[in-house]
């Protein structure tokens, strides 16, 4: 909410400031004067002001003594301390009582106007500038969408869209957000078409111009770090979308230099497939062939129980020697606390420490089952905000602080994203079909409208192990989720508005992988 263009100037010599006040009034500000703290508080009890200019040295109570009472009357009022003192102690006191700015007399009318304008009109000015920038960039984004896009262009397009999604949500222009939302709907359909046309070619031809995939994270991003550094921290945040990463990046940048690259999740974009591919460097069909004891698809819950062994095997093959590997999967706050107690011992040793954080994935799934979570994370912006809140006090933040203390590099990524689903799409299947809402395996499986999903009949060509005769894979596109004709209403009421994964959208497939280097290391 915009603050009014009104100023309360509290100064025992306020009558000598006519030139300053006139300058403010010429710029459209209404200025009220008070010569002491009591009069100022009386005015504040009657109305709020856009900004308060408060003299620090006045007869009676000092300006610093008034800040608390002013905050109790108007907690959000910007307060600018104006003083004749250049002493560092006074400046520190002003900062300590949470004033918004600090001016040392003598001040020019231009200085005062600049500070007042920043505090009162700054948010609106930034919003107007952002709107102009978005309108300009939106035309460019539309043009890019209508031209042929390779995988690099898809990365550039989607990463910029994610950044705009975060920026516009912080503003108040719903019209711009709706325009971006409509654009996102369009590119999701385009992306499904792109994947249909290229995914099997990427897998069939080793020399194809393809993006880094889940199977390449180890070789392209982790191994170069191991060759360069004694100890490396490897973090996988399960189910982290690009826009959630954009929210976390400023917090991480306070202590780390960040280099971001991107890769594509393998399909389906689900933990048993995508995360195993990261840790093994292999497609599911290769894991099943090489390590059949670690791949039993009859039980999805057990498919990720051998990630440490898969990582050790991958690193030994890539490095030509065994690499010391520590691994922990963290699903609860207590597990996080226990891990932090051991982490200094881990990272002080040579080798790789791999940590998997499941909070975002649990939040994403639990939201469908918990009414409170559903309300708190009602849309993408709310989910981002909740992710940021969690991260600030999480074991993940604690792990990064420990890495910074030991001056070791961190490779941080995710295994897949998620998509906010609103559109049911009817599927037909036999009773043996899997229960997932964004992807299904089953016999005679099909979507009522073929264009609303990607049907895979030749599983090995998509890097997946063969199943019994007639079993197909169906993956949802856009913001769709699968429903059966006999359970249409039940599924719609329960899952509409859920964040799901396993399908084919940029949000699920295009993922960040970030090298975090402690400053000064």
Image (tube, helix red, strand yellow):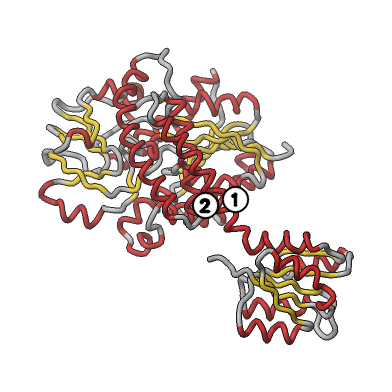
| Residue sitting at x 24%, y 25% | 459
Left or right: 462 as drawn, with respect to 163 = left
Distance from the alpha carbon under mark 2 to that under mark 1 = 9 Å
Residues marked 2 and 1 touching at CB (< 8 Å): yes
Label 1, on which residue?
398
**Where does the C terminus fall, quadrant-wise?**
top right
Q: Is residue 491 left or right of residue 325?
A: left
Q: Nearer the viewer, residue 35 or 507?
A: 35
Q: Is residue 98 visible?
A: no
112 vs 290, nearest the viewer: 112
When the figure is inspected, residue 480 is found, relative to residue 306, above or below; the finding is below
Q: Which mark is residue 336?
A: 2
- In the rendered image, residue 376, in percent from the top left (x then y), is placed at 41, 61
Q: Secondary structure at mark 1?
A: helix
The percent coordinates of residue 457 (x first, y second) are 20, 25
Query: Percent x, y for residue 132?
Result: 53, 46
Compared with residue 62, is residue 472 higher up or lower down, i.e. above or below? above
Q: Is residue 175 above or below residue 215?
A: below
Image quadrant of residue 49? Answer: bottom right
């Amino acid at each position: 909410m915009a603050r009014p263009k009104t100023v309360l100037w509290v100064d025992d010599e306020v009558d000598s400031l006519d030139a300053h006040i006139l300058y403010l009034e010429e710029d459209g500000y209404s200025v009220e004067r008070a010569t002491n703290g009591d009069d100022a508080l009386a005015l504040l009890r009657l109305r709020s002001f856009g900004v308060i200019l408060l003299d620090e040295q006045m007869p009676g109570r000092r300006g610093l003594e008034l800040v608390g009472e002013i905050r109790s009357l108007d907690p959000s009022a910007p307060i600018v301390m104006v003083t004749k003192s250049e002493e560092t102690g006074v400046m520190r006191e002003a900062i300590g009582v949470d004033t918004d700015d600090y001016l040392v007399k003598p001040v020019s009318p231009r200085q005062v106007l600049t500070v007042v304008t920043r505090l009162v009109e700054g948010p609106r000015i930034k919003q107007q500038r952002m709107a102009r920038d978005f309108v300009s960039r939106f035309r460019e984004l539309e043009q890019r969408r209508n031209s042929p896009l390779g995988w690099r262009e898809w990365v550039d397009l989607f990463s910029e869209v994610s950044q705009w999604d975060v920026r516009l949500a912080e503003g108040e222009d719903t019209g711009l957000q709706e325009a971006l939302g409509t654009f996102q709907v369009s590119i999701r359909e385009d992306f499904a078409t792109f994947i249909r046309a290229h995914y099997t070619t990427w897998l069939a031809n080793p020399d194809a111009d393809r993006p880094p995939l889940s199977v390449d994270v180890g070789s392209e991003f982790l191994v170069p770090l191991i060759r360069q550094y004694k100890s490396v921290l490897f973090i996988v945040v399960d189910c982290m979308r690009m826009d959630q990463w954009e929210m976390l990046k400023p917090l991480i940048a306070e202590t780390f230099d960040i280099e971001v690259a991107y890769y594509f999740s393998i399909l389906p974009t689900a933990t048993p497939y995508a995360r195993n591919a990261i840790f093994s460097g292999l497609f599911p069909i290769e894991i099943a062939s090489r390590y059949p004891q670690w791949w039993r698809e009859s039980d999805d819950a057990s498919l990720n129980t051998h990630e440490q062994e898969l990582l050790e095997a991958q690193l030994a093959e890539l490095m030509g020697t065994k690499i010391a590997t520590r691994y922990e999967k963290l699903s609860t706050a207590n597990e996080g606390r226990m891990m932090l107690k051991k982490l200094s011992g881990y990272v002080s040793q040579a080798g790789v420490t791999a940590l998997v954080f499941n909070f975002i994935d649990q939040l994403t799934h639990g939201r469908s089952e918990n009414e409170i979570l559903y309300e708190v994370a009602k849309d993408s912006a709310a989910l981002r905000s909740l992710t940021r809140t969690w991260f600030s006090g999480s074991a993940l933040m604690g792990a990064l602080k420990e890495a910074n203390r030991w001056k070791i590099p961190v490779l941080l990524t995710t295994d897949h994203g998620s998509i906010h689903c609103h559109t049911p799409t009817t599927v037909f299947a036999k009773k043996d079909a899997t229960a997932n809402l964004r992807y299904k395996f089953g016999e005679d499986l099909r979507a009522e409208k073929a264009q609303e999903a990607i049907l895979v009949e030749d599983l090995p060509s998509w890097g997946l192990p063969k199943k019994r005769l007639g079993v197909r894979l169906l993956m949802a596109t856009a913001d769709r989720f699968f429903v059966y004709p006999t359970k249409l209403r039940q599924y719609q009421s329960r899952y509409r508005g859920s964040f799901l994964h396993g399908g084919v959208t940029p949000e699920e497939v295009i993922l960040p992988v970030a090298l975090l280097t402690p400053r000064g290391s």
